[in-house]
Image (cartoon, helix red, strand yellow):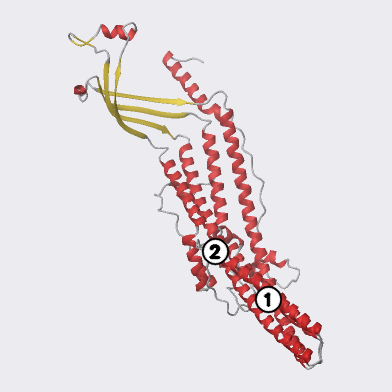
Amino acid sequence: MRFPNIKRQKYTIARVIACGALILPSCRIPELRQADPGPVLPASFTGAINEAPSGTVSGTISEAASGTVSGLVGPSISPDSSGQLGVEEFYKDRVLTQLIDQALVNNRELKVLNEEVQVARSEVLARQGAYLPFVTAGGGTGLDLSSRFTRDGAVDSQLDIRPNQPIHNPLPDFRMGLNLFWRLDIWRALRNARDAAAQRYIAASEKRNDFVTRLVAEIAENYYGLVALDKRLETLNKTIELQQQSLEIAIAKKDAGRGTELAVQRFQAEVRKNQSEKLITLQDIIETENRINFRLNRVPMSVERTSADFYDLNINTLSLGVPSQLLQNRPDIRQAERELQAAGLDVKVARAHFFPDLTISAGVGYQAFNPKYLFNTPEALAANVAGDLVTPLINKKAIRAEYLSANAKQLESVYNYQRVVLNAFTEVINRVSMVENYRKSIEIKKQQLAALEASVDSASKLFQNARAEYVEVLLAQRDFMDARMVLIDTKRQQLGAVVNAYQALGGGNSLSVPPGPALPPHRWRKQPQP
């Protein structure tokens, strides 16, 4: 290569070196690994529900979009999801919603999550200033004693500050001024770190919101469980009363010589069995009440509830919407999405470490050996400025390891996001089908219960008129009580399925309080993609 002059030659060589420092590191950056694709969700919940063996639920995706799915008596498919309803609107039970309100105010685990949100928020504030210049102001003083047998001491002994005024030894030093340090964010490493912290702040808020939905569901499920236990206790009381009447009849027949001691003993044993079961039910009521009390952060006490019309109690008609609404309604999906975006930004931050860092440092102020000269301008004025461009060349194993680790964590976030979405879809299908199947089971059990109730009445009358054996009365009463208990348990499970289906659709978060003061607007609010 020929150059017209030496100056041009030096300039070109300098440019080649600078470009090499910038380009060569990027040539040695490891390749990123890509995640495996996740399962594709259907456009509607209808297809998954249609696979039920009974075949009573039918419909197409187009029908689902219009909200006219035939044969679906319980949950309905419509463009609007029940997860968009507020707690008060969905449950319509003043006592229950008051308990939920108390839990949202007093629950200690929720308060811990609120503090985690504040920690994440503070991390965003810290990252926001990292890419801006750091300016400090200060002053100081010192004393420097130089040896006469050193170069500095020997030179100072031969110099005068002013005519016939030698340099002091020891020499005082007084200084004050401003200092600046600025790491130029030429590769957006600091701003990407800020954006990643912002995404994690939102993820922490969504984690708290997800806990709120689960807290609401847990309180509601225990509340309806408590109502079911009340009905169980009521059934036991009625059964014991009925068996006491049969016992009195057996005793009267024995005294009249028309019965035996065996019948009396069998009826008495049945009464004692149910009295024992009653005590166990009372213990279950106490434990269920205290589970609610613990979530409300209060000492054990009686929990108010409404137990009327339990068998015909319907919380709300479930509207499923479409699977894509889960991405908007479920806080755990939104949390996983934010964590995925933050992981993608972390990869960009790690990648920037392969390239040069440019830093600028500067200072300006006053410096003098005597305070009376400190503010003499321009004699006492001191200033400095420097710029450093540093790039890694050899032994970049730590940088490569950080980059590959960020890539691995990004893949973890991708797979976790896929898992959370699939789990949400599966939860909706399981719980909605449970609501429908248990509803049908309850209708059949009510018919069974009516028949058994009539059989108990018939057996009691026949036994009283000596036209039936006591064993038939015992079996009729036992079958009737067992059927009523099964009906109560089935109804309890159906109500729990409705509660959990509402939570699976993302409902129960409308009462959550905001995590704290809003952050000032910044670029991270544009939700950068990984």
Few, some or many residues within 10 Å of mark 2 (<14, 14–19, 20+): many
Marks 1/2 in contact by CB < 8 Å: the verdict is no
216 or 203, which is in the foreground? Answer: 216
- Residue found 74% across the figure and 82% down from its top: 477
Counting from the top left corner in percent of width and height, residue 251 is at 75, 87
User: As drawn, which residue projects farthest toward the left?
Assistant: 163
At mark 1, the secondary structure is helix
Above or below 86: residue 116: above
Few, some or many residues within 10 Å of mark 1 (<14, 14–19, 20+): some
- Residue found 68% across the figure and 68% down from its top: 434
Counting from the top left corner in percent of width and height, residue 98 is at 49, 69
Counting from the top left corner in percent of width and height, residue 222 is at 59, 67
- What is the number of the mark on residue 216? 2
* Quarter holding residue 133: top left
| Left or right for 31, reference 300 | right
* Quarter holding residue 62: bottom right
Q: Earlier in the sequence, mark 1 or mark 2?
A: 2
Find the distance from the CA under tag 1 to the CA under tag 2: 34 Å
Question: Which residue is under mark 1?
Answer: 275
365 or 67, which is in the foreground? Answer: 365
Residue 66 appears in view: no
Above or below 504: residue 256: below
Q: Amino acid at mark 1?
A: Gln
Between label 1 and label 2, give the one nearer the viewer. Answer: 1
126 or 61, which is in the foreground? Answer: 126
At mark 2, the secondary structure is helix
Q: Amino acid at mark 2?
A: Val
- Residue found 34% across the figure and 34% down from its top: 135
Above or below 3: residue 408: below
| Left or right for 318, reference 144 | right
User: As drawn, which residue projects farthest toward the front?
Assistant: 255
